[in-house]
Amino acid sequence: MILAFRKIAALFLVVLIVLVSTGCEIKKTDQQVSKESVSTIKVKNLDTFKEKTISYTKSSELLPNPAINNISYNIQEYYNSNKKEYQYVLNFQSNPLTEVQKGINIIPYNVIKFSVGALQNNETNTFIKSVSSPMFIKFNNSYISDGSYYLFSANKPIKATEFQLEGIFVNAVAFENKKVGEETYRYISNSKESLMTD
């Protein structure tokens, strides 16, 4: 009787140890997940130009870095695993023209308006996610400077093929009989085609 009791007690002790150790492992795993390192980046909202801080655990370039004359841009995806949120940022950079570009009379641009849409709604011919830079009262203050601009967030990742971009540019230098800012160009680009008109 005593021997049977000892066996039951020993078995109970083994089960208890296993449960406790398993619980500790689960708790440790939860702690490891919650301790995933978070980085931050300061950007501006594209629609207001007000500063915003984004926190993220992983980032990746969504769209490549094409160039429109002297203007290069890309879209970066920032994922926050703690919030399960995807955030999208547009990066602008103006570059000096190369000697080759100057040799073929490429004109540098200033950006005065830029819009980004994603996730097409074919019924309304619009985008579910969209944002545009603001309109300015004074034309000379309307240039969009180099930097990073917050677009929008989503609960699920948005594919690069779901984006469409539209920009309004003006000539940054005088040429022929045109003054600075006198010639306007419209640029539209998606995964299928790009179009530039003046």
Image: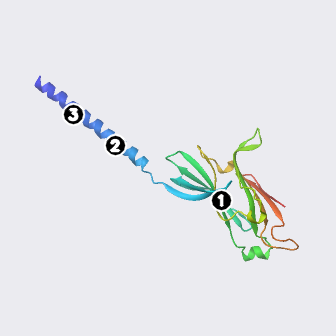
Sequence-first tag of 1 and 2: 2
Question: Which amino acid does the dot numbered 3 rest on?
Answer: Leu
Closer to the camera in the image, 49 or 125: 49
Mark 3 nearby-residue class (10 Å; few <14, some 14–19, many ≥20): few
- Judge left or right: residue 184 versus residue 65: right
Q: Residue at x 65, y 59 (%)?
A: 74
Q: Is residue 9 above or below residue 25?
A: above
- Judge left or right: residue 150 versus residue 103: left
Sequence-first tag of 3 and 2: 3
Q: Residue at x 29, y 38 (%)?
A: 20
The image quadrant where one finds the N terminus is: top left
Reading the image, the residue beneath label 3 is 13
Q: Is residue 49 above or below residue 19?
A: below
Mark 1 nearby-residue class (10 Å; few <14, some 14–19, many ≥20): some
Question: Which amino acid does the dot numbered 1 rest on?
Answer: Asn
Q: Position of residue 85 (x, y in %)?
A: 56, 46
Reading the image, the residue beneath label 1 is 74
Q: Position of residue 66 (x, y in %)?
A: 69, 62
| Marks 3,2: beta carbons within 8 A | no
Reading the image, the residue beneath label 2 is 25
